[in-house]
Amino acid sequence: MKADPSVASFQVEFHRQPSGVRVAFRGFINESTQLPINHRDLAFPLDIDLSGVTLINSMGLRTWMLFIVDVSKRGPVTLHRVPEVMVRQFCMVAGSHGGAVVRSVLAPYRCDACGAASTQELTIGVDVVPATYSKPPPRKPCARCAAPSSFDDIADAFFSFTLATP
Ligand SMILES: [Zn+2]
C-alpha cells in the first residue's frame, strides 16, 4: 500500500499534562489531513501547539475550522505558538479559530543592527494588547548579535485577529 505523502507528512503528538492535554501539530494542513477531532486521548483543558504547522491551504483551512469549531465547543482550548501561516488565516477569515483563545504567536522579526531574520514568540495580552494591537510590538534581542530586533510586518494587519479573540 502506498502512503499518501501529504497525509504521512502530518503528525500529531499527545502529551498528558497535570490538567488536560497538550497536542502538537506538525506539517501541512490540507483537505486530507486527519485532525484528531474524535481522538480517544482528547481531554480538556486542551492546549494546542501549532508551531510545527508549515503550511495551510484553503481546503486545509476548512479541515481546520471543522476541527477547532467543534472541539472548542466541548471544552476550553488554547492555541500556542501560532505560526505566521495560520495567523494570516485568522486575520482573513472571521471565526477561523473557533472559540479557542490564542495565547501566543510566532512573529517575524529583523535585527536593527545585523539584519538577521528571526521568529519571536509574542504573548497576546502581554506583548500584544488587543485594544492597541495596531502599535508595533516590543523589540526583542537578536539571537545572533543580541542587539534589538524589530517586528518585521504591519502590526495593524498581523494582529487584527486579536480583536476577535474571546
Ligand atoms: Zn543581530
Image (spheres, helix red, strand yellow):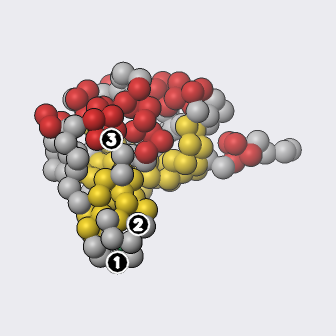
Residue pictured at 28% horizontal, 73% vertical: 147
> Residue 139 vs residue 1: left or right?
left
Q: Circle 3 is placed at which residue position? A: 154
Tag 2's secondary structure? Answer: loop
Count residues near mark 1 (Cα–Cα under 10 Å), then give few for <14, some for 14-19, many for 20+.
few
Residue 134 in the image: state x and y as whole percent.
22, 37
Residue 166 in the image: state x and y as whole percent.
22, 29
Tag 3's secondary structure? Answer: loop
Where, by quadrant of the figure, is residue 113 drawn? bottom left
Asked if residue 19 is positioned above or below residue 117 in the image, the reply reads above
Q: CA distance from mark 1 to mark 2?
A: 10 Å
Tag 1's secondary structure? Answer: loop
Name the residue nearer the viewer: 35 or 161. Answer: 161
Quadrant of the image for the N terminus? top right
Q: Circle 2 is placed at which residue position? A: 115
Mark 3: amino acid: Ile
Mark 1: amino acid: Cys
Q: Is mark 1 within 8 Å of ligand 1?
A: yes
Residue pictured at 35% horizontal, 65% vertical: 111
Asked if residue 14 is positioned above or below residue 62 in the image, the reply reads below
> Residue 151 vs residue 85: left or right?
left
Residue pictured at 52% horizontal, 29% vertical: 61
Q: Circle 1 is placed at which residue position? A: 145
Mark 2: amino acid: Gly
Marking on residue 121: none
Q: CA distance from mark 3 to mark 1?
A: 24 Å
Q: Is mark 2 within 8 Å of ligand 1?
A: yes
Count residues near mark 3 (Cα–Cα under 10 Å), then give few for <14, some for 14-19, many for 20+.
few
Of the image marks 3 and 1, the number of the one nearer the N terminus? 1
Count residues near mark 2 (Cα–Cα under 10 Å), then give few for <14, some for 14-19, many for 20+.
some
Of the image marks 1 and 2, the number of the one nearer the N terminus? 2
Name the residue nearer the viewer: 93 or 18. Answer: 93
